Amino acid sequence: MAHHFTIRPIMTGTKGKIKQLRREGQIPVSIQHRGQETLHFQTEARPLDEFVRLHGEASMIVLVEEGGAKHRALVHDIQRDGIGHQLLQVTFQGVEGDEQVKVHIPLVFHGEPDAVHHRTATIQHSIEQVEVRCRPGNIPEHIVVEVGNMDMHAPLRVADLGKNERYEILTAPDTVIASLASLQAAIKEEAALVAAAAATASAA
């Protein structure tokens, strides 16, 4: 079931007034529809913040105007404060009917390679999500990546995820998802970086 949030026309557009709006617990939200003018509203910040932290882009949402009009949408862009990570603004992608949409889906890694278990290697995650195209009802919450059978010479790539009849993965097939690195090499590299930083600091 899609989550519902009440929206109302935004009451101001100046920077000072927007700051005041945020102090009052509201934030600006926009809804973009293909081929249509972008709509601008405001909504309560806290419940929307909780939603985007939990679901990101991978969930349908229904934005309900006070007059009753409803907009089915997906999170398109999230803006946060660079210091406190306070939610500042959210832009939504409007969804009409059963049209296909593009959305980024988080990857969930499962399993433990033998080399990691025996502490001879460490696993490196190159990406944490992939872009998929599907119908709104087929959006997965996440995609499971099995890493238990990985070895040092065979990184996992997007192509290894295989195909799914419910969605199409758009991220390039040769994109590396995860790989194994020698733990000893990683320790040496970290030590070299620390030494280089120390040398730079002493030279200054």
Image (cartoon, helix red, strand yellow):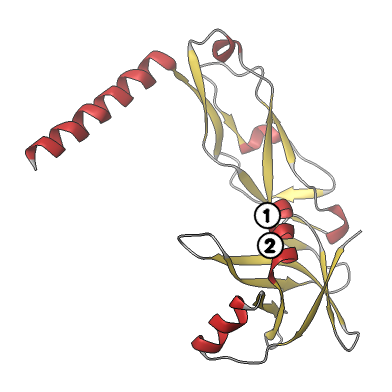
Q: What x and y, as percent, mark residue 57? A: 70, 58
Q: Residue at x 65, y 72 (%)?
A: 91
Q: Which residue is mark 1?
A: 53
The answer to whether one can see residue 46 in this image is: yes
Query: Secondary structure beneath disc 1?
Result: helix
Q: Residue at x 26, y 30 (%)?
A: 193
How many neighbours does mark 1 have within 10 angstroms: few (below 14), some (14-19), or many (20 or more)? few
Q: Position of residue 188 (x, y in %)?
A: 31, 19
Q: Secondary structure at mark 2?
A: helix
User: Which image quarter: residue 158?
Assistant: top right
The answer to whether residue 34 of the structure is visible from this angle is no
**164 or 18: which is nearer to us?**
18
Locate residue 69, reporting x and y percent.
88, 84
**Vertical placement of 2 versus 204: above or below?**
below
* Left or right of 64 on screen, residue 53: left
Q: CA distance from mark 2 to mark 1?
A: 6 Å
